[in-house]
Amino acid sequence: MTHEEAMAMLAGTYAMDKRYAKPEEVANAVLYLASEVSAHTAGMGMHVDSKVSAAS
């Protein structure tokens, strides 16, 4: 399997918009967790994966 074939296969599993998260999208999740806004966020996992986790 070529790299292009593997990427096409993986992209087909993405439910939201068929792309990987951009670095700034992951950074936004990190900034949220580091901010005061998330003060009452505890005991959870945050998936930044275009809803792949929800679809499986």
Image (tube, helix red, strand yellow):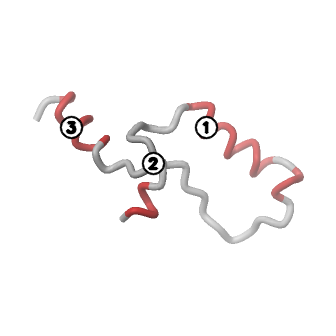
Q: As drawn, is 24 to the left or to the right of 36?
A: left
Q: Residue under circle 3? A: 6
Query: Callout 3, which amino acid?
Result: Ala
- The residue shown at (31%, 41%) is 11
Q: Residue under circle 1? A: 25
- The residue shown at (42%, 55%) is 52
Q: Secondary structure at mark 1?
A: helix
Q: Residue under circle 2? A: 16
Vertical order, 19 against 51 (above or below): above
Query: Callout 1, which amino acid?
Result: Glu
- Residue 25: x and y, percent? 61, 37
Q: As drawn, is 18 to the left or to the right of 48?
A: left
Q: Nearer the viewer, residue 4 or 16?
A: 16
Which residue extends farthest bottom? 43
Query: Callout 2, which amino acid?
Result: Met
Query: Of label 2 and label 1, which has the lower sequence position?
Result: 2
| Quadrant of the frame with the C terminus | bottom left
Q: Nearer the viewer, mark 2 or mark 1?
A: 2
Query: Of label 3 and label 1, which has the lower sequence position?
Result: 3
Q: Nearer the viewer, mark 2 or mark 3?
A: 2
